[in-house]
Image: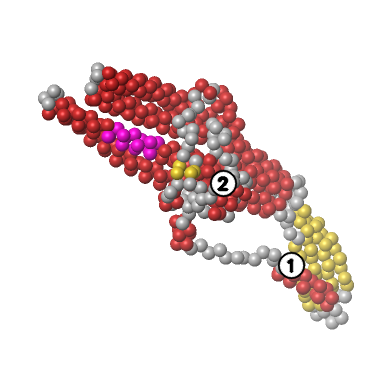
Amino acid sequence: MRTSLAFVLPLLALACGCAPYKYHPAPIAPPALAAGLEVRNLDDPGLRAWMSQAAASEPSAWPMTTWDLSTLTLAAYYFNTDMDVARANAAVADAAIKTAAMKPNPSVGADAGYETAAESPYLLGFDFSLPIETAGKRGYRIAEATHLSDAGQLQVAETAWMVRSRVRTALVDLLFAEKTAFLLHEQESLQSRYVDLLEARFRAGEIPLPEVTAARIDLTNLRQALRAAEGQVGTARAALAAAVGIPLSGLTGKTLSWARVDEPPTSGTLPAPDVRATAVENRLDVQRALAQYEAAQSRLQLEVARQYPDIDLGPGYAYEEGVHLISLRLGTVLPVRNRNEGPIAEAEAQRKAAGAQLLATQSAVIAQTDKALAQYRAAYAVLEEARRSTAQADEQRRTAYQWLKSGEADQLTAVSADIQTAVAERARLDALHQTQLALGSLEDALQRPIDPNIVPALPKKAPR
């Protein structure tokens, strides 16, 4: 008996006291987090190392002075906090696979007693129980967790696309805001010169005052538009910094460029059937909905398997009245009062809901793609018309200057032609801006860049 106690008690102490994992506190100080956000910038050496290692994009020089859509997107993958949240949620889903794969622990029990018999007053018992899962339940749990983990990884990629989309929109808005402000500045100078020429004619008595007044009103409106455009440059710059995940000061001294921003693809190169097929095959939310449906399938298989009870296999030992007793116990739950009907019905309903969600997602993708393609075609048609108007205005301007050179026209005619050309160029620039925004919406519908070389893929390795 003493030998048995000496064996059982240390075993219990060992099983309870040898926990391999210890709790480590991780306090968070909001002021320190805010201070860390404020010092983020594009010169961060950690960004360079991550771009080189995880993103396979070795910068030619550091710090980089010129940033385009691809490099800004990589910076957003590194800095943007939405990416941190998505990666953390995906890590939770990955950890759930380990939980699903755990096998139930055996249990052990010991008891001791005393009786009045003088010849053998001590009683001792020792029980061991080994749970055995049946019907492949563990495999179904792992399959469900794996599908949910896949859905989590797809959510990371989907978040990355949304981050890229915000960077693209902000960069387009900023570049066109700068171009618009530049054109308005030139047009304001031309309009001011035009007003001076009209005022000279008015003083000479050649034209009435209302013509001068109308030109002055146009000049005032131009100056207001110029001030608004200059303010829009600052707003767009702040939006770009926020999309990347850095403060506005992080863009100080950086040149932002997009070499092919003036060359959107013609609408004829985007046939509707091909675009629709690409969207259905490539959309990350469709793939995520499919992974969730597969998880619901595994969940139903698990609940069906739970109709079959698990088994407890338990050898036992007892010492009583000087006799050593060894037993073997086999136990299970009797499925008499229920056969897991409720959870099975819930799992079936969840599978139907997941299937309906998948169908709804595909339907929404097709509708969004058709709408985005129609918007792009309309925007591109406006751009083509604006280009024709600009070409006509340029031709009229060249004619006016030829007349001026030959003495058939005066300076006022030439300046008027310059203003007409500037107005046409502004219209073309606005049409190009709207076309690029429509192209961005179409890329969002596909969740894929129209030009695959313009943006890097999501790196496999998370920063920090």
Q: In this orientation, which residue lies closer to the viewer: 347 or 455?
A: 455
**Amino acid type, residue under disc 2 in the picture:** Pro
Q: Judge from the rendering whether residue 219 lies leftward or rightward of residue 183; answer left or right.
A: left
Q: Which residues are magenta?
A: 176-189
Q: Is residue 313 left or right of residue 157?
A: right
Quarter of the image with the N terminus is bottom right
Structure colour scheme: secondary structure
> Pointer 2: what residue?
59
The overriding secondary structure of the stretch rendered in magenta is: helix
Q: Is residue 344 left or right of residue 62?
A: right
The answer to whether 287 is drawn above or below residue 243 in the figure is above
The tag earlier along the polypeptide, 1 or 2, is 1
Q: Residue at x 58, y 43 (%)?
A: 458
Front-lying residue, 441 or 39: 39
Give percent across and percent down for residue 80.
Answer: 50, 49
What's under tag 1, amino acid-wise?
Ala
Left-right relation of 135 to 222: right
Residue lying at 72% horizontally and 49% vertically, measured from the top left: 138
Does the image show residue 148? no
Viewer-side label of 1, 2: 2
Q: Which residue lies most toward the front here?
A: 406
Q: Residue 279 bears which disc, if any?
A: none
SS at badge 1: helix
Q: Which residue is mark 1?
A: 15
In whole angstroms, how far apart are the C-alphas of marks 1 and 2?
54 Å
Pick the residue in front: 401 or 287.
Answer: 401
Q: Position of residue 453 (x, y in %)?
A: 57, 35
Mark 2, other Cα within 10 Å: few <14 / some 14–19 / many ≥20:
few
Residue drawn where x is 38% and y is 30% of the image? 429
